[in-house]
Image (cartoon, rainbow, N blue to C red):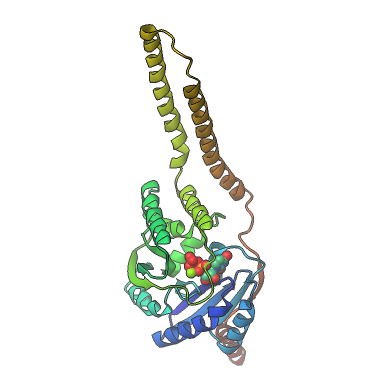
């Protein structure tokens, strides 16, 4: 029988985890495929791990992956994907912003032979005007700057076929801008629209500073265009200052030498200084990322892993049968 794995990164989600699992298991049991859910504890500081233990004890579909510390959602996701055994893998947030009830629809589309079925938000209820606007702007900028087509209004909530997951897992880079990596891998994709809800409980771990860094990650991971900005900025300023020099010579010839232009001098110096700093900063962003990748560190460390009881019993069942068969 076909199996669907569900990977859930969990960081301080004690308030919603039970509710999440109730909705997820009700949905998955109704589909009528074999399934497992891998809860990845990303160094939660609350009772999330205890709740995961209880879920594992109660439900044979539950696997528990406990990372050695908080590595961030992207890496937690990857760690879960590394363990997922399903023919298709669903990636979903624990906070119920991604409705588990959409999974049957994703599975249905996958069954028609589509490799990547992503859930596309129709609305963003419960999010501020500013967040909606910045998200909107981000997708547009990404589309312009990178050659790959990142579908707008799409989070990580999606279903991937086995071969898409295997392809994705070959990308072991540390700066894991998942939306970009998903798109970069390719394969046939289709969108399923849904309404994104507000968090059921707890609070988002995102603030605007994090979002800004996230956007920076996306752009620097998939585009070197900002590095070229330096060249064109330099060329443009050189051209303008050349014209200005010509104008100065001519105006001195015609009007003589008026009061020396101290303010314009200062403006020119400050302007050049700040452009150089900006350009250095851009180079620094890329250099820092190259540095991090070059160290080739493992992506994460595992504190403990408990496979789903169902698969453990399935394996022992097979072993038992083999022994019985002599
Ligand atoms: N998450 C995680 N590690 C982190 C931050 C978040 O595993 O360092 C998980 C979190 O538990 C949730 C998902 O990633 O399941 C999305 O997080 P959040 O709701 O804070 O992000 P948002 O929905 O605001 O983008
Ligand atoms: Mg959320």
Q: Nearer the viewer, residue 262 or 212?
A: 262
Q: Is residue 145 above or below residue 47?
A: above
Q: Is residue 122 left or right of residue 306?
A: left
Q: Nearer the viewer, residue 68 or 12?
A: 12
Q: Is residue 41 left or right of residue 3?
A: right
Q: Residue 37: x and y, percent?
A: 52, 78
Q: Tell me the quarter of the image containing the C terminus.
A: bottom right
Whether residue 191 appears in this view of the structure is: yes
Q: Find the residue positioned furthest to the bottom.
A: 324
Q: Is residue 11 above or below residue 323?
A: above
Q: Is residue 240 above or below residue 44?
A: above
Q: Residue at x 36, y 72 (%)?
A: 195
- Which image quadrant for residue 110? bottom left
Numbered circles on residues, count: 0
Q: Residue at x 55, y 57 (%)?
A: 172
Q: Residue 189: x and y, percent?
A: 35, 64
- Which image quadrant for residue 300? bottom right
Q: Is residue 145 left or right of residue 268?
A: left
Q: Residue 279: x and y, percent?
A: 51, 36
Q: Residue at x 64, y 81 (%)?
A: 50
């Amino acid at each position: 029988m076909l199996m669907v794995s569900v990977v859930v990164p969990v960081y301080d989600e004690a308030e919603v985890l039970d509710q999440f699992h109730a909705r997820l298991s009700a949905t998955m049991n109704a589909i009528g495929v074999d399934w497992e859910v891998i809860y990845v504890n990303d160094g939660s500081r609350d009772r999330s791990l205890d709740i995961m233990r209880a879920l594992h004890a109660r439900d044979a579909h539950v696997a528990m992956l406990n990372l050695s510390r908080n590595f961030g959602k992207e890496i937690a996701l990857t760690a879960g994907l590394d363990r997922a055994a399903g023919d298709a893998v669903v990636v979903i947030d624990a906070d119920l912003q991604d409705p588990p009830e959409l999974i049957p629809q994703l599975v249905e589309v996958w069954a028609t032979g589509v490799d990547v079925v992503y859930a596309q938000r129709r609305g963003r209820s419960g999010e501020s005007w500013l967040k909606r606007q910045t998200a909107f702007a981000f997708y547009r900028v990404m589309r312009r700057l990178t050659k790959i087509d990142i579908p707008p209004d799409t989070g990580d909530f999606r279903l991937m076929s086995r071969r898409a997951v295997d392809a994705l897992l070959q990308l072991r880079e540390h700066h894991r801008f998942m939306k970009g990596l998903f798109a970069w891998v390719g394969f046939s994709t289709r969108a399923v629209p849904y309404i994104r809800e507000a968090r059921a409980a707890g609070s988002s771990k995102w603030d605007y500073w994090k979002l800004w860094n996230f956007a920076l990650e996306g752009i620097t991971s998939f585009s070197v265009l900002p590095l070229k900005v330096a060249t064109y900025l330099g060329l443009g300023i050189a051209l303008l200052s050349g014209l200005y020099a010509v104008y100065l010579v001519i105006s001195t010839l015609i009007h003589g030498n008026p009061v020396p232009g101290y303010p314009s001098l200062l403006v020119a110096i400050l302007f050049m200084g700040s452009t150089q700093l900006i350009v250095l900063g851009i180079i620094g962003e890329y250099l820092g990322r190259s540095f991090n990748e070059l160290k080739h560190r493992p992506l994460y460390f595992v504190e403990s892993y408990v496979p789903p009881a169902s698969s453990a019993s399935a394996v022992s069942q097979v072993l038992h049968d083999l022994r019985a068969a002599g």
